[in-house]
């Protein structure tokens, strides 16, 4: 087993990577790769990251790719621990508390008055201590199995018991208690404000409430003004606070000393763990509505050696999110490759789910390579080195080349860069040319892919390509037999029936069954 331990300085390494400390820094955001757009991964990542504070880190992790099966399993273990609702809620509360503490600290730079800054620093430390102590207590009692959370639990318990944190928590509570005992009175006469110590003066709020208590009839509307908890302080309130500090010099001197001693109170290991938790929380939040709708997610078996892949009850995650949000049904599909099989050739009528199937295949392998649970009730997937896609693009009129030439250039670049560990997803390559040329070029392309021994999905209207050899598996998008114009969006493993090109021609020339029926109906 790959053990995860703290390094020599006692710093927790990472919840994302099992290796060296500092591996959590996954680099600066790069541009979105074209394959991500083709597979709608950009939509998934944008929705997962949302407006979270750690948006950039989540985006980099989601677009990244883990190097080996052990790294994938490391993240899967954390996800599986966080499937426990109680642990998920505890981590989410911890993350919220850390976010509040950081928000308080960011406000300090915007404040002009010393005592206000010191008070907000004290509040930030109190929020931080409560968040850390709460999570440490929950982890201590929780059943966790992942190497990452076991190591973090040990780290957090050690940190909470350390002299540094004990002093921080004790000093914070003591200082809050001391300042909580400060009582003072303000008297406003015209433009003059007097501040004095509180000496058992009457509480006029209580007197007013008691006077009007007899007139109360049942529940009444609360007309009291609720002040915003924002960091703004004008010069008048600042001067009042200065006068209060003069009245209570020991208390405010203690606050000043506290701030000098605990200015940088956030522990680096705790901070990193909280940032990395955001990736897990964000993805689980994203898939929760789909699970509520009855859709399955699973932790795939991932292999860097075996290319016998399969998935059951799977679907396009980006499309499913939109359909579930619109309360529409989601159609699931299955696929499998066995033995020497490497290539899916998918034929069938247009708008029947072929492109969605291709996107699903690519999405599943990418998500599995990030350690995330994937759509489906079961999956066995391949850990690739690179994922290549070729989807139709809008023709650039500024170029002197046509679509066929562009297709040939793009496919050539893929074949030169691909390795036996690559995955290639090709959607309607050479669709702009004749049937003869599409068959000829498609045969040459798939022959190269098979020689390379790479996994591939090839969407085409050329049925003959589905029977090129025992490395090729024929898949078809299906229709309702009684209603040829109605698609089921099911893509099944079956021989091509020779109708794909005929349907394509019929649709091109407006001669489909549905259109002919409409035109011939009186």
Image (cartoon, helix red, strand yellow):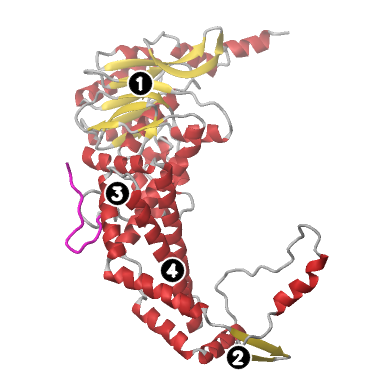
Mark 2 and mark 3 lie on one chain; the one further toward the N terminus is: 3
Q: Position of residue 104 (x, y in %)?
A: 47, 69
Q: Residue furthest right?
A: 215
| Alpha carbon separation for disc pair 1 and 2 | 79 Å
Which residue lies at the image location 30% right of the left edge and 55% below the top edge?
Answer: 27
Q: Which mark is residue 196?
A: 2
| Alpha carbon separation for disc pair 2 and 3 | 53 Å
Query: Quadrant of the image for the C terminus?
Result: top right
From the image, tell me which residue sits under label 1. Answer: 335
Say if 462 sits above or below 53 in the image. Answer: above
What SS does tag 3 mark?
A: helix
Which residue lies at the image location 25% right of the left edge and 18% below the top edge?
Answer: 338
Q: Which residues are magenta?
A: 1-15
Of 27 and 204, nearer the camera is 204
Mark 1 and mark 2 lie on one chain; the one further toward the N terminus is: 2
> Is residue 260 within the magenta segment?
no
Q: Position of residue 150 (x, y in %)?
A: 27, 49
Mark 2 and mark 4 lie on one chain; the one further toward the N terminus is: 4
Disc nearest the viewer among 1 and 2: 2
What SS does tag 2 mark?
A: strand
What SS does tag 4 mark?
A: helix
Which residue lies at the image location 58% right of the left edge and 16% below the top edge?
Answer: 510
What SS does tag 1 mark?
A: strand
From the image, tell me which residue sits under label 4. Answer: 126
| Alpha carbon separation for disc pair 4 and 1 | 53 Å
Say if 399 sits above or below 496 in the image. Answer: below
| Alpha carbon separation for disc pair 4 and 3 | 24 Å
User: Is the C-beta separation of discs 2 and 3 under 8 Å?
Assistant: no
Mark 3 and mark 1 lie on one chain; the one further toward the N terminus is: 3
């Amino acid at each position: 087993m790959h053990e995860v331990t703290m390094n020599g300085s006692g710093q927790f390494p990472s919840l994302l990577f099992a290796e060296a400390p500092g591996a959590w820094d996954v680099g600066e955001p790069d541009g979105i790769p074209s394959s991500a757009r083709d597979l709608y991964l950009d939509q998934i990542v944008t929705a997962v990251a949302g407006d979270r504070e750690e948006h950039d880190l989540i985006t980099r992790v989601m677009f990244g790719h883990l190097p080996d099966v052990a790294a994938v399993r490391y993240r899967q273990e954390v996800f599986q621990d966080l499937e426990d609702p109680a642990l998920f809620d505890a981590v989410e509360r911890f993350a919220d508390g850390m976010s509040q503490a950081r928000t308080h600290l960011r406000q300090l730079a915007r404040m002009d008055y010393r005592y206000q800054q010191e008070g907000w620093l004290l509040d930030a430390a109190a929020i931080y201590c409560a968040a850390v102590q709460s999570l440490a207590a929950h982890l201590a009692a929780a059943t966790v199995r992942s190497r990452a959370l076991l190591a973090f639990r040990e780290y957090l318990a050690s940190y909470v018991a350390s002299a540094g944190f004990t002093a921080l928590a004790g000093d914070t509570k003591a200082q809050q208690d001391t300042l909580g005992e400060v009582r003072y009175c303000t008297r406003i006469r015209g433009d003059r404000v007097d501040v004095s110590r509180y000496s058992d003066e009457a509480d006029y709020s209580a007197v007013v409430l008691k006077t009007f208590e007899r007139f109360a009839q049942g529940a009444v509307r609360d007309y009291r003004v609720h002040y915003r908890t924002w960091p703004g302080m004008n010069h008048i309130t600042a001067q009042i606070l200065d006068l209060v500090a003069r009245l209570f010099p020991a208390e405010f001197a203690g606050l000043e000393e506290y701030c000098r001693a605990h200015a940088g109170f956030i522990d680096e290991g705790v901070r990193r763990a909280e940032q990395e938790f955001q990736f897990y929380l964000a993805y689980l939040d994203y898939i929760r509505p789909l699970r509520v709708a009855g859709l399955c997610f699973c932790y795939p078996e991932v292999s860097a050696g075996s290319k016998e892949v399969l998935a059951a009850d799977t679907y396009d995650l980006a499309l499913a999110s939109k359909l579930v949000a619109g309360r529409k049904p989601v159609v699931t599909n299955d696929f499998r490759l066995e033995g020497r099989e490497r290539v899916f050739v998918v034929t069938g009528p247009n708008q029947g789910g072929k492109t969605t199937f291709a996107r699903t295949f690519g999405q599943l392998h990418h998500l599995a390579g990030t350690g995330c649970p994937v759509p489906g009730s079961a999956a066995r997937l391949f850990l690739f080195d690179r994922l290549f896609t070729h989807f139709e693009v809008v023709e650039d009129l500024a170029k002197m080349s046509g679509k066929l030439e562009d297709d040939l250039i793009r496919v050539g670049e893929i074949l030169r860069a691909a390795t036996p560990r690559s995955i290639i997803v090709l959607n309607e390559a050479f669709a702009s040319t004749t049937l003869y040329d599409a068959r000829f070029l498609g045969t040459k392309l798939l022959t190269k892919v098979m020689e390379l021994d790479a996994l591939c999905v090839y969407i085409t209207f050329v049925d003959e390509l589905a029977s090129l050899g025992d490395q090729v598996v024929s898949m078809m998008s299906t229709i309702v037999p009684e209603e040829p114009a109605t698609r089921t969006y099911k893509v099944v493993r079956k021989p091509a029936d020779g109708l794909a090109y005929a349907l394509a021609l019929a649709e091109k020339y407006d001669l489909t069954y549905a259109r002919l029926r409409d035109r011939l109906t009186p």
